[in-house]
Every structure is written in structure tokens, then in C-alpha cells.
Image (cartoon, grey):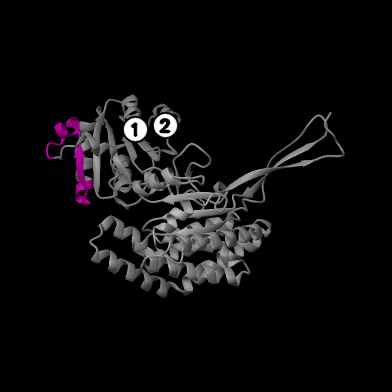
Amino acid sequence: MHIEQSAISQWLSDAAHAARAASDVLARMPGAQRDAGLRAAAAQLRAHCAEIVAANAQDVTAFDAAGGSSAFRDRLLLTPDRVEAMAVGLEEIADQPDPLARVLAEWTRPNGLVMRRVAQPLGVIGMIYESRPNVGADAAGICLKSGNAVILRGGSDSRHSARAIHAAFAAGLRDAGIPEAMVQIPPTTDRAYVAAMLAASGLIDLIIPRGGRTLVERVQAEARVPVLAHAEGLCHTYIHAAADAEMARTILANAKMRRTGICGSTETLLIDAAIAPILLPMLIEDLAQLGCAFRADEAARAIVPGLAAAAPEDFDTEWLAAILSVAVVDGLEAALAHIARHGSSHTEAIVTEDAHAATAFLNRSTSAVTMWNASTQFCDGGEFGFGAEIGIATGRVHARGPVGAEQLTTYRYLVIGTGQVRP
């Protein structure tokens, strides 16, 4: 059904004004009440689990009928365990310190003026995301904790799930006496609503896109509102010459195959030429038994002849599937050069027992998250202790890495005097 742009613009304007009013209330609200809202929302998610799973089944059925991929189906699917994980995530967010109750810095000038930098919410967040309906609950929870209001525009393939999750979260807000306009979803899945959000300068303070390259590039190209975005999750695991072989096998299997459709999944294996002849065949066998396919460079295929040859673009591809790009590199410098050339500044890992090599890798990688002897799939707000995340930021302005409640705050200054005037 065609909807006039003027109607969509009016819907967005009304939503944004209601969100602004709600954010003003949240900014003054005690942290304990915001935490009570999070716990009430968690309780309502549990109470409405059956309805949420049933709504999700409608989305999954439609997705299957349209011939969607298995990786994106996994992102879309909700089970009782995943609904419980959403509820637990909200409770973990509630357990975090209040990000608004922070004096970030304080100093006194020679004239006696006291300068105080204090945390404050950003205001109204616009969240545009694809496929994963749990993102709506995570984003709402993080925004509530940080005193922000949020307008959530999920993908059309998860619309039934999003409505059910929103209804449960809103019930929790009512239980805690928090304005329901703190979290809103559009009345339509028309793409024109996205355009209205991107043009809403003065109404929305920050846009956060969470999805594939096409979505992120569109938002960055069209937005008239500041954007906090991440590029693709083209993550690398580099197995250094001094790696423990068993540790490397365990880490790589998890980093690639635990969940292949998430942005923290390793997409490229870099292995040091000094150990590749012995270790690479074992790594390939491990992953092949788990159902992984490969795209390998010439040096890797010389060691394991049966591997499929990598095309030039394969090392620039975020597979989000059980496919791994493989390259043999001549030491640390070559590994860092490969990552700089092909990476997306998301997450990199080195596996080594050499502390000097690990320190060099950690210090010289410029990605948002860099790891030593750990799976790249730990790049997740919950694993960082944030309870959840609203996304992984890979840019160089404001937040980087998993974005939790603290990262959705800015600051202002309080200046306290005793009658000073400027000469």
C-alpha cells in the first residue's frame, strides 16, 4: 500500500517530539528507576515469551518462503532460550553503574572557578537495523540505562517479532512509571520512513545503522544526522609462529564456526609460513569436519592441495557463512600489512606464546578491538560486561568497539563561581 511521504514525515515528527519529551524526563530520572524499568521489561519479555516466539515464527516462515540464506535465518530466529537471553541482558544492563552519575573531571582555575565535566545523555537515538530482532530489546535497554529515547526501525523481515518485543518492553516501562515514548517503532515498514529518519536533523540526535554494507553505506551517504556506524565485520585471526598448536586449533574453530553469521566471526585466517606446513593441515581438517569451506592463496594450496583457490576479492569479503579465507604470511609484519590492506577495523586476534610479538600486534593494530589468545567472537557487549550492545563501532569518532550505555553519553560543563567576573 502506497503511503504519502507527508504522512510518513508527520509520523516521524510526532514520534521524535514524543521521544524528546521522554528523554528529558529520563535525563532527570533517578538511576534506580531506570534500572527498575529494565528489570520490569525483562520480566515482561519472559511473561510474553510464547507470543514473541509465535510472532517470530511468522517472520521465519515468510523468510523461508522467500528463499533466504541459512546465515540470515539464524540471525532472524528467536527461541525461548534467545528470549531468555534478551531478558538476562536487560538485567545485566541494570546491574551496571549508572552512566549518568559520573563527574568525568573537576579542576579549579587560578581565579577560583570550579570547572566540572559531567556525563549526560545524547538525547534521541534513531536505530535502523536488519534481521536480528533481539537488537530491538538490546538497543531499548541500553538507551533506557543511558537516559536516551530511541526510535527503532527494524527490517521488514522481522516486523512481527519487533512488534511483539516492543509490546513487552513497553509493558515493562508502564510497570515502572517510565514514559512509553522512550522506545517507539514506526507504524509502517515503508522504506520512506528510513529516509525521513535520515533527514531528521534537529529531531534525532544520532543515527545508528546495524546491518550489511548496503544499509550502512546508504545511511552514511544520505544522513543529515550524525551517524555512529560500523563497517563490515571482516575479522582476522593470525596464528603466529610461536602459537601453541592446540590453543590455535581450539580458538580458530570457535572464532569461525561458533556462529558464522555474526560480525565478530573470523573471516580470514592468516598463518605464519614457519608453522604452516605442520599446523595448517590440522586446522583445515578441524574446520572441514565442522562444515567449513575455504578460499586459499597459492601458498596455502601448496600445503593443502585440495583447497579452492581464492579470488582477489575473497580477502575483502565478509562471508557471514561457513567459508574461510586462508593466507600464509611471512611473519608479523606481513600479517599486519594484510590486515591493513583488507580489514574493516572491526576485530583482529593473534594467537602466540611470544609476549613481544603479541604486544607489537596489540599496539600496532588500529582496529576497534584487538585480541591476544582469544576468539574474535568475544567482540560482543555482553562479553565485555556491558550487558548488551547497540552495535560495534569501527569509526574513529566518539565510541569504538561494542557500544554500551556509557558510550551513548556525552558530557557538559558545570562552572561554579563565587562572584567572579572576567577582566
Residue 31 lies, in percent from the top left, at 65, 58
- At label 1, which amino acid type do we have? Ile
- Establish if 153 lies above or below 252: below
Q: Which residues are magenta?
A: 287-306
Check the image and report above or below for 378 versus 69.
above
Q: Is residue 255 magenta?
A: no
What SS does tag 1 mark? helix
State the image coordinates of residue 126 (x, y, percent, origin top left): 50, 54
For the residue pair 248 and 8, the one nearer the viewer reads as 8
Callouts 2 and 1 close, C-beta under 8 Å: yes
Of 281 and 150, which appears nearest the observer? 150
Q: Position of residue 79 (x, y in %)?
A: 36, 67
Up-down: is 334 above or below 55? above
Q: Tell me: 114 left or right of 47.
A: right
Q: What residue is drawn where x is 20% and y is 43%?
A: 294
- Say what amino acid the circle numbered 2 marks: Ser
In the image, residue 232 lies at what x, y percent? Answer: 36, 43
Query: What label sits on residue 365 in the rendered view?
Result: 2
Disc 2 from disc 1: Cα separation: 8 Å
What label does residue 212 carry, if any? none
Q: Which residue in the protein does label 1 denote?
A: 339
Membership of 291 in magenta stretch: yes
Helix, strand or loop for disc 2: loop
From the viewer's perspective, is residue 254 above or below residue 89? above
Q: Earlier in the sequence, mark 2 or mark 1?
A: 1
Q: Residues within 10 Å of mark 2 (few under 14, many from 20)?
A: some
